[in-house]
C-alpha cells in the first residue's frame, strides 16, 4: 500500500506533519468522505485528488494529491471492511454516483431518508460558492470574498434547517 505524507493544521489540535498509509490518512480525514459507508472508486479518487480538507475552525489537512488504481482501491476496501472496530460497511451505489457530492446525497438518503435531488443540488450550490470564495481570496478581492462568506453561511444555515428534520427523525 502506498505511503502518503500529510499535514494537519489548526488551533484546536497540535499542527502535525506525518506519513502513513492511505488507511491512516482515512483515519484522519475519512469521516468527511466515508462516514461508515465506503464510497465507490470515483468519489474516493475525487477526494484524494483534491489534496486537502478544510475543517473550518478545527483546522485543515493537506496531502499530496493522488489517485488509487482499481486494484489498490480493492485492497483498501478489504482492509477497511476487515477493521470490525471501525464499523465500515460496503454500500452498493447507483451508476449516477460519480462525485463526492453524489455520494453524500446518496448516503444521506440511504441513512436518513433525505430526498436526493434537493439535497444534492444544495451541496453542489455550496461547493460552487466555496470555490468562488477561494478564487476571490486568491485574487485579493476582499469585498467579493466577504459577500461570498455571507452567502456560504446563509446556505449552510438553510441546509441545516432542511436536514434537521431528517436527523431528528421527524419525517
Image: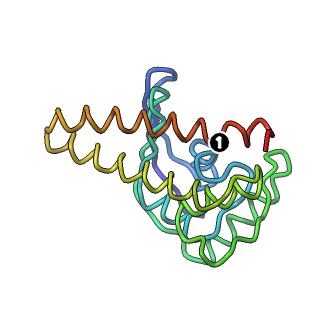
The quadrant where residue 11 appears = top left
Most extreme residue toward the front is 171
Name the element at disc 1: helix
- Residue 66 relative to residue 146: left or right: right
The quadrant of the image that shows the C terminus is top right
Instruction: Please provide percent x and percent y for residue 155.
Output: 45, 40
Q: In the image, what residue occupies the spot 46% across and 56% down?
A: 124
Q: Nearer the viewer, residue 127 or 1?
A: 127
Instruction: Please provide percent x and percent y for residue 103.
Output: 61, 61
- Residue 20 relative to residue 9: left or right: right
Q: In the image, what residue occupies the spot 64% across and 69% down?
A: 40
Instruction: Please provide percent x and percent y for residue 63.
Output: 43, 50
Q: Nearer the viewer, residue 129 or 85?
A: 129
The quadrant where residue 56 appears = top left
Residue at the spot of label 1: 163
Crowding at mark 1 (Cα within 10 Å: few <14, some 14-19, many 20+): some
Amino acid at each position: 500500500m502506498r505511503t502518503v505524507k500529510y499535514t494537519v493544521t489548526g488551533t484546536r489540535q497540535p499542527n502535525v506533519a506525518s506519513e502513513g498509509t492511505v488507511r491512516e490518512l482515512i483515519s484522519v480525514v475519512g469521516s468527511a468522505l466515508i462516514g461508515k459507508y465506503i464510497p465507490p472508486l470515483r468519489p474516493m479518487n475525487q477526494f484524494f485528488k483534491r489534496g486537502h480538507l478544510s475543517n473550518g475552525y478545527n483546522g485543515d489537512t493537506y496531502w499530496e494529491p493522488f489517485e488509487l488504481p482499481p486494484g489498490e482501491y480493492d485492497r483498501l476496501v478489504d482492509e477497511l471492511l476487515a477493521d470490525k472496530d471501525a464499523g465500515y460497511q460496503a454500500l452498493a451505489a447507483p451508476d449516477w454516483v460519480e462525485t463526492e457530492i453524489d455520494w453524500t446525497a446518496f448516503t444521506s438518503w440511504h441513512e436518513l431518508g433525505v430526498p436526493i435531488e434537493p439535497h444534492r443540488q444544495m451541496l453542489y450550490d455550496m461547493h460552487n460558492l466555496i470555490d468562488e470564495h477561494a478564487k476571490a481570496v486568491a485574487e485579493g478581492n476582499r469585498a467579493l470574498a466577504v459577500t461570498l462568506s455571507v452567502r456560504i453561511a446563509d446556505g449552510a444555515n438553510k441546509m441545516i434547517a432542511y436536514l434537521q428534520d431528517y436527523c431528528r427523525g421527524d419525517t
